Image (spheres, helix red, strand yellow):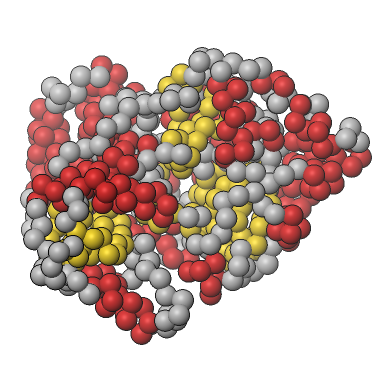
Amino acid sequence: MIPSYDPNDTEAGLQLLEDLTTNADAIQQQVLHQILSQNSETEYLRSFLDGESCNIQENFKNKAPVVNYEDIKPFIQRISDGDSSDILSAQPITELLTSSGTSGGKPKFMPSTAEELDRKTFFYNMLVPVMNKFVNGLDEGKGMYLLFIKPEIKTPAGLQARPVLTSYYKSEQFKNRPFNKYNVITSPNDAILCEDSQQSMYCQLLCGLVQRSHVLRLGAIFASAFLRAVKFLENHFTELCADIRTGTVASWITDSGCRDSALSILNGPNQELADEIEALFNAKSREGILKRIWPKTKYIEVIVTGSMAQYIPTLEFYSGGLPLVSVMYASSECFFGLNINPLCKPSDVSYTLLPNMAYFEFLPVDDKSHEETQLESRSTDDVSLTEKDRIVDLVSVEIGRYYELIITTFAGQLSLDIFGLYRYRVGDILKVTGFHNKAPQFSFVERRNVVLSIDTDKTSEEDLMKAVTQAKLNHLQGLFLLTEYTSYADTSSIPGHYVLFWELKPRYDNDPPKLDKKMMEDCCSEVEDCLDYVYRRCRNKDRSIGALEIRVVSLGTFDALMDFSISQGSSVNQYKTPRCVKSGGALQILDSRVIGRFFTKRVPQWEPLGLDS
């Protein structure tokens, strides 16, 4: 199911895309048959396939349950502890992939196989002909893509457990990738693979600046990571220019691979280049600075859908009008689809699912006109029998409708039904926007139950409530009642940070609250300490999220917020305080009534955890 083609051959790539999407239904049936046939003798599949090969797909759809992560977690623990994976999969499990989503405050772990790396390589190669169709001359220069690895651990069985991108960048498929004239990047492998993110960032930016006359595109995976690099560049441009001027690398770059690879690209002093870059940064405004530094750049490639859409205004400020391109839709569980109209507006991005990547099913979600009540009330339990009857396959979705994505993947990631990646609920809500040939196109709407996200963190309403409750109990000391609260992700600065709006009522009088600074800072820290593993990693290790802020608002603020919502069409009978606000009008009401602002004064504790920690 992994077609072979030369990624340097644009026409062949585009024709392959046409073939895949034209034959989407037949390919989906082949994918499902291959998955089930390959693993029909595994312990779990035998329980519902009944050994009847002629009815294998029908039995699967009728009897296989739809599952979530908690259902499969015990089996993943077995693999982590060294259980033989051939009990569950026809192929050996080679590693566990850690997701950015969390379960019980810890990362999710997804089994993977060597074949999955080949499938990811195929997926990345498919991005190239799509971009070539819309942008000419990409073989005449390079891309400055900022790529990073993250912490990894070893399970008791000796398997690596690491993020999906770390797995790919450390693979032989990436490190020894064949030359592709359309996809040459400025960052050396040794800089990408440096485990110190600050040293890696510095050297990748240094290499990108030295090669500025060759750079045709800029990018990172997520908009948040790209803007973090821009901020780093603003803070370190003097030092970077000094290195270019002298042909040396800053003394604090101690990783030998990172340092040596950067020195090889520097290739001696360049006074003229250093002066040019320094003059650009010393101009009055940083607006459009990216276009000025890399004048041949044609676009910026970053994911700006879902929670990343909040970064679009900041990206537009720095980019100088460059198109923002979201090229792919992927997760730890599976790589799903491509944006085959990459130069569209960020608000119009849709992804065409590639039918050979996995077997896709869709659970209809209630009409989005009721999204405030319907989605919040959706259960995270297994799909009921009634809902299961409503599940449709890839080519049967309807334009304009909303669905929750369900996947069945290949061996390891896909074949472990007992691990939940048979009919596994990814947690993404998608809207069908159209079709390309027979393959549907989807816009990403949201992650189920997520209210706050800055980087790879995903904080649910329940997680936020628990953290706020703990802070209230431990630090308000019986002096105040927390009458209402809400939140929003503030990305006006880099890095962005969580903001909580609290309305506090003194317990013993009606005077405005007299706020003790240390008490409120302790509340901020308590909230952060109670948030999940990924949030704390982003704060402590990655530094991709800033200090949490509590803004105390005057009494009556949330009454004004309710009045505003009702004026916008909400029902007075059904109104409930949103736990995350996004509209400009609501934020204006809240900010206009702030009487105190407080920030966390320390980063929360974090350290890499094992599966059983």
Q: Name the residue located 50 percent from the left edge and 62 percent from the top edge.
A: 376
Image height check: is 510 above or below 219? below
Q: Quadrant of residue 52?
A: top right
Q: In this view, does 71 lie to the left or right of 218?
A: right
Q: Name the residue located 82 percent from the left edge and 37 percent from the top edge.
A: 48
Q: Name the residue located 19 percent from the left edge and 53 percent from the top edge.
A: 478
Out of 62 and 296, give the one closest to the viewer.
Answer: 62
Q: In which quarter of the image is residue 401?
A: bottom right
Position of the C terminus, as image quadrant, is top left
**x, y (%) of residue 340?**
55, 56
How many marks do you count on the picture?
0
Out of 348 and 59, give the one closest to the viewer.
Answer: 59
Out of 431 and 384, give the one closest to the viewer.
Answer: 384
**x, y (%) of residue 519?**
14, 48
**x, y (%) of residue 437?**
69, 60
Image height check: is 148 above or below 515? above
Q: Quadrant of residue 3?
A: top right
**x, y (%) of residue 134?**
49, 57
Image height check: is 591 above or below 315? below
Asked whether residue 498 appears in the rendered view, the answer is: yes
Q: In this view, does 46 lie to the left or right of 74?
A: right
